[in-house]
Image (cartoon, grey):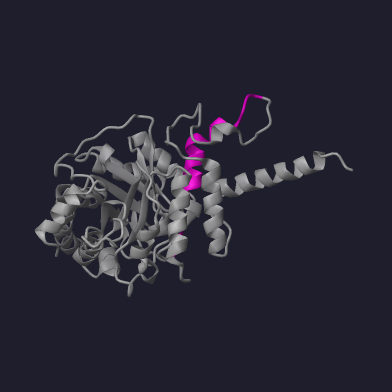
Amino acid sequence: MLLASSIKQFRCASCIRKPLAYLNWSRSYSSDFVKIVEVGPRDGLQNESRPIPPATKAELINRLVRAGIRNIETGSFVSPKWVPQMAGTPEVLSLIDPVPNTEYSVLVPNQKGLDDLFSLLSASFSPDSAAPPPPPITEVAIFTAATDSFSKANTNTSVSDSLARLAPVARAALAAGLRVRGYVSVIITCPHSGRVDPRRVRDVSRELLQMGCYEISLGDTTGAGTPASVRTVLEEVAKEIDVNLLAGHFHDTNGTALANIFAALDMGLRTFDASVGGLGGCPYSPGATGNVATEDVVYALTGESSYGDVGEPYLDTPAFTAACKGARWDIGPVSFPALVETGAWISRVLGRETNSRAGRAFIARRERGRKLAENARPKL
């Protein structure tokens, strides 16, 4: 555990925010603003079998930030025995180019993971002139599940025991000036015990909020959700929890992730997790595919702004850049073309095509435009 003096140093560090009040269970955004939390560098890459160098992961994070993403889960402090792909997280953090107004987070599954993060931060505050700059971490994420069977498969503990273990982790993180985000897995169906009782999702979410989490990400881990089942769960959770404190985390196993996002939007949610290129899956949920692709979410929320006027050709116009004028939803400074490039790049690194349908369509249109331009050039 960290010494009290070290924790005070963290509180004074300009790169870390002061903790929110434990029971501040309400907040508000513009009703048209949608926050996208990019989880590709952690949730997306953790299941890859081939080793990915820390420099490549850091480059992915830096490219995402340059594309306008402002909330990124960068990695996790987990045992390399269980998740070998996350073993290089400290090095990844050292290679990130911090950008102002960007939230960088890491997953910490237990006290050991948080202590490892604290050790990294402590080294940055060493009086030694050669000490590295502090990593730009502003928050940590903790996770549990809505069913005991999934929790035992994932962390070898029941839900109640996992919550008991997470409570001191959340307290220590908050005391060090870090925000805490909570995950609840398998909110619709569990691969081990079937359909999940929405009341269980509500109760677990409430427990995480009582620990001091500022936001709860509700995960359709199996990707079995439909708009109807998502509404059922959210209606139950909303009986006790402000929907502004909830986020949606939808896997696209059955092609319903975007439909589920729009169902959640109708219910009042304004924060959604996504993974560039549709990276991801879950080792404890057989058959589950990646998270919804970030590019697909961005296109679904703002793509209409690229149509042009009636009768004009369908082109990728300048409106498809930092600000998508005329779009129903405000997603901040995200550049769709830059995001597509990033998804295509990391997919090439992994030896495959991007899983983003909007990304593939954009690349195909751009290639068609290039060929048309070439054919239109005067022949010498």
The percent coordinates of residue 35 (x first, y second) are 37, 40
Q: Residue furthest right?
A: 380
Depicted 114 relative to depicted 272: above or below: below
Depicted 151 relative to depicted 296: above or below: below
**Quadrant location, the N terminus:** bottom left
Residue at image coords 14%, 60%: 164
The percent coordinates of residue 203 (x first, y second) are 19, 50
The percent coordinates of residue 13 (x first, y second) are 22, 49
Question: In this rendering, does residue 145 appear at all?
Answer: no
**Quadrant location, the C terminus:** top right
Residue at image coords 46%, 71%: 51
Depicted 148 relative to depicted 259: above or below: below
Q: Is residue 86 left or right of residue 213?
A: right
Residue at image coords 14%, 42%: 23
Query: What is the quadrant of residue 114 in the picture?
Result: bottom left
Residue 150 sits inside the magenta stretch: no
Residue at image coords 26%, 67%: 155
Residue range of the region highlighted in magenta in the rendering: 287-310
Q: Nearer the viewer, residue 14 or 104?
A: 14
Q: Residue furthest bottom?
A: 81
Query: What is the quadrant of residue 320 in the picture?
Result: top right
Q: Residue furthest front?
A: 129
Question: In this rendering, does residue 128 appear at all?
Answer: yes
Residue 300 sits inside the magenta stretch: yes
Depicted 58 relative to depicted 269: above or below: below
Q: Residue furthest top?
A: 310
Q: Is residue 114 left or right of residue 324?
A: left
The percent coordinates of residue 230 (x first, y second) are 35, 45
Q: Nearer the viewer, residue 191 or 99?
A: 99
